[in-house]
Image (cartoon, coloured by chain):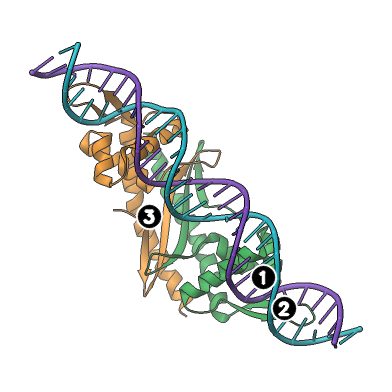
Chain colours: A orange, B green, C purple, D cyan
DNA sequence: TGGCGATATGTTTATATTCGCATATAGAAT
DNA sequence: ATTCTATATGCGAATATAAACATATCGCCA
């Protein structure tokens, strides 16, 4: 599930990417961060999610914090301390976001398939 | 015509980007380069196109060369010397590519509009 | 043949991003 | 109290990307 989505035709690929931006044109959330949020939801921990994705905890934490600051609300409810050091679970808003995004990607894939087919037909006319 | 395309909802935007890649995962052509090619077509000169886009000739030339190398065919027919120093016109392949890309973007915009409407409805449920 | 203007290209400088190191803190359990 | 582990965060190093500088070449025309 890593890397941008896209369609293939012969040896050239038409790729696409979707992401959220705020009014200042700053990137808030893209595929990578959505996947990270998804992993947090699955694993209950930012560290575990970072490990699973093969990125450093520092980076994962920075990404979540940055997204939350730009969105203006929390995506993850974080606790620290305790027997297991701490934990992270999604807020209702975070949960809603990944659900909506998941469906978005499915619909995108559908649309892309149709559009790119036409594109390559045209290029090879 | 600069910057990524997208749809708006309240103060958050859903943006998208499309581009071509080769089998090595190298980016070949995106919005910027397509616009550059379009300008060359309009102006008949790489320098004039670079000026119009506000980028250096060095950069414009490098972009075109890079794209051509990765595609394996020429996008622009270049001539140097002569009364006016030289000129650049699109090859038939280059022309086809920008035509197809132009239509692609229109269809993308359509699809995006529908999909993002649904996305934001879901997020705000 | 000398000038002009666009193509052609290597080299270097600057800027922006990302990565990773180091370190602090919370809090349940023993 | 001490230990254990995940959250929290500043900062300098390492890369990647882009911008800028410097020159060479080509070929019509005066």
User: Which class describes the residues within 10 Å of circle 3: few (<14), some (14-19), or many (20+)?
Assistant: many
Gap between marks 3 and 2 measured at Cα: 44 Å
In the picture, measured across the screen, residue A54 lies left or right of residue B25, that is: left
Report which residue position mark 3 lands on.
A108
Gap between marks 1 and 2 measured at Cα: 9 Å
What is the tally of numbered marks visible in this picture? 3
The answer, for residue B99, to whether it is visible in the render is no
Gap between marks 3 and 1 measured at Cα: 35 Å
Q: Which residue lies at the image location 49% right of the left edge and 64% below the top edge?
A: B104
Residue B21 horizontal/vertical position (percent): 42, 66
Residue D22 horizontal/vertical position (percent): 70, 64
User: Which class describes the residues within 10 Å of circle 1: few (<14), some (14-19), or many (20+)?
Assistant: many
Q: Secondary structure at mark 3?
A: helix
Q: Which residue lies at the image location 41% right of the left edge and 49% below the top edge?
A: B115
Q: Chain of mark 3?
A: A
Q: Quadrant of residue A92?
A: top left
Q: Which residue lies at the image location 52% right of the left edge and 70% below the top edge?
A: B66
Q: Secondary structure at mark 2?
A: strand
Residue B86's label in the rendered image is 2
Residue C13 horizontal/vertical position (percent): 62, 53
Report which residue position mark 1 lands on.
B46
Q: Chain of mark 1?
A: B
Q: Is residue D18 above or below residue C8?
A: above
């Amino acid at each position: 599930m890593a890397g941008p989505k896209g369609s293939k035709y012969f040896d050239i690929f038409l790729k696409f990417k979707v992401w959220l931006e705020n009014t200042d044109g700053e990137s808030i959330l893209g595929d990578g961060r959505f996947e990270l949020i998804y992993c947090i939801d699955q694993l209950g921990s930012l560290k575990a999610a970072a490990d699973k994705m093969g990125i450093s905890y520092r980076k994962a934490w920075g990404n979540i914090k940055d997204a939350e600051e730009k969105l203006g609300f929390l995506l993850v409810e974080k606790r620290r301390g305790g027997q297991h050091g701490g934990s992270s679970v999604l807020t209702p808003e975070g949960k809603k976001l990944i659900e909506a995004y998941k469906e978005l990607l499915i619909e995108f894939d559908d649309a892309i398939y149709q559009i790119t087919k036409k594109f390559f037909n045209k290029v090879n006319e």
